[in-house]
Image (cartoon, grey):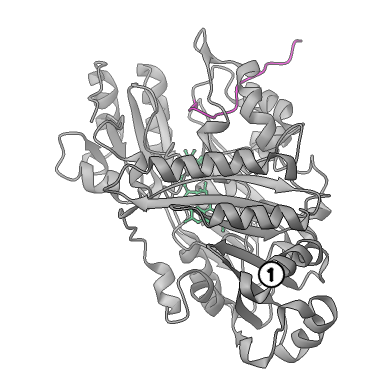
Amino acid sequence: FVVSLASSDGFLQCLSAAIPNQLLYTQSSPSFMPILVSSVRNPRLFTPTTVRPLVIVTPTNASHVQSTVICGRHHDVRIRVRSGGHDFEGLSYRSERPEVFAVVDLNMMRSVRVNRRAGTASIDSGATLGEVYYAVSKASNQLAFAAGLCPTIGIGGHLSGGGFGMLLRKYGGAIDNVLDATLVDAEGRVLDKKAMGRDVFWAIRGGGGESFGIVLSWKVKLVPPPKVTMFKVPKSIDEGVIDILTKWQVVAPALPDDLFIRVVVQNDVAEFQSMYLGTCDMLLPLMESHFPELGLNQTHCKEMTWIQSVPYIFLGSTATVEDILNRTTSLDMSTKATSDYVHQAIPKDGWVKIFILLAKPNAGLLIIVPYGGKINSFSEAATPFPHRGGVLFNIQYMNFWLATTDGSTQTKWVKDFYAFMGPYVSQNPRQAYVNYRDLDLGVNVVVGNVTSYKAAMVWGEKYYKGNFKRLAFAKGKVDPDDYFRNEQSIPPLVARK
Ligand code: FDA
């Protein structure tokens, strides 16, 4: 590990005076490494040369977070904040460049308070999606939360970037259901929606993690899914998957909002994974009229409650509802991923070529998520997340390799695949999903101690399109000195008076 160079005694003394010592883990503490590793998902981002934090702060209340920010400002030590640690580039716990920084790890601030009558929940950022889903289902079997699939994702990062899952066509993304939030800003103030103002409240709902401060908690609207019917139907090239996918890409985004069918493609097989908000008897005629090519029948249907669908889809059919509370992550496999948005159907010969690339040695996989319905119903400017009307689907390209190997072939496959997809995906800008962060899309340049707006446009417009400039002005309002920054944070623009 690269050892921090700056003298940071003043910062550590300041923290010790304000925060109980048992919540502070310096590099010499025996618990430093276990805490640091605890939510690292990707060993590619955790190697002997990874720039590690000077100290990890594990706050238990807002005042600890405020004190960390105030001490950091005073002693010129920056902060990275971690909720679930799933950032695709590990920006919540590591720095690309040698610098002195602290990590605020919110894993002790993770309560979920459900108001059954109002159909809302107040969620601390350190809670995982699994913990939220579990708490909501315990409070009422009539309520659910529309967010992502992986139960160990942290609420803090997920809601900062968008958050979509199997309910996106019916209820939109997680950010579309945020009612309020509490933010610690760069002055160490605690601000709610009213106090932070319209622009900053707009910005924190999809404008990416970290740039605007530390979000302590979120108030969200819950949604009412009835029982659901799930299916997973694999189709291989021999079973005509290329024709089926060519049809799927136009059908899936235009289906009734109650029906969501995503596809995971690997080797020569595509698995169609679906959630339908109704019974199998209702689903079968719908599939027969819209998508008979899949050949869905009674034997494919699995009727269950919404909460049972969470482990079923992500952890497998033998996993239990309690398994979604397990926060343990494995460090066996490294990954590299990136994403695209598709607005026009890919011609059949494009799919043929895609399968040729998927058949290469050390090839990765695709996770293809249809949009349409509610998520497309918002205007591009409603939230910073601009991937709305006209989007047919999001594709994630991912590859993985044993942590003990170097992964260069697998990483190259992702790059080559991204290059190949150029003609088939969105252009000018080529859009990407910020929650599938990829530093290969561009990194910040700091000029005169402030992140350059011009340099950041390279990656910023891919994630945010025309919303990028408004995000920069929101940043200019709440953090004009650019205290909260990382390799892909929003640069501040300050409006001329
Ligand atoms: P982490 O703690 O690493 O934070 C991510 C970013 O947000 C960092 O920049 C961090 O500093 C910042 N941040 C974290 N907490 C903050 C806070 N309280 N205030 C301000 N900034 C904060 N996405 C999706 O939409 N649907 C899906 O189904 C999936 N599935 C999925 C599976 C797997 C295995 C992975 C690894 C990832 C996904 N994702 C996803 C992507 C996921 O939504 C994204 O990585 C989130 O940013 C992760 O949030 P965490 O809090 O876990 O990350």
The magenta-colored residue range is 484-497
Q: Is residue 107 magenta?
A: no
Q: Is any atom of residue 143 visible in this view?
A: no
Placement of 52 over or under 341, stated as above or below: above
Q: Quadrant of the C terminus?
A: top right
Residue at 59% over, 18% down = 480
Q: Quadrant of the N terminus?
A: top left
Residue at 47% over, 80% down = 317
Q: Is any atom of residue 171 visible in this view?
A: yes
Q: Amino acid at mark 1?
A: Ile
Residue 344 image position (x, y, % from top left): 81, 50
Identify the secondary structure beneath mark 1. strand
The residue indicated by pointer 1 is 261
Q: Main secondary structure of the magenta part?
A: loop
Residue 391 image position (x, y, % from top left): 78, 50
Residue 296 image position (x, y, % from top left): 70, 84
Q: Does residue 204 appear to the left or right of 373 in the view shown?
A: left
Residue 32 image position (x, y, % from top left): 21, 41
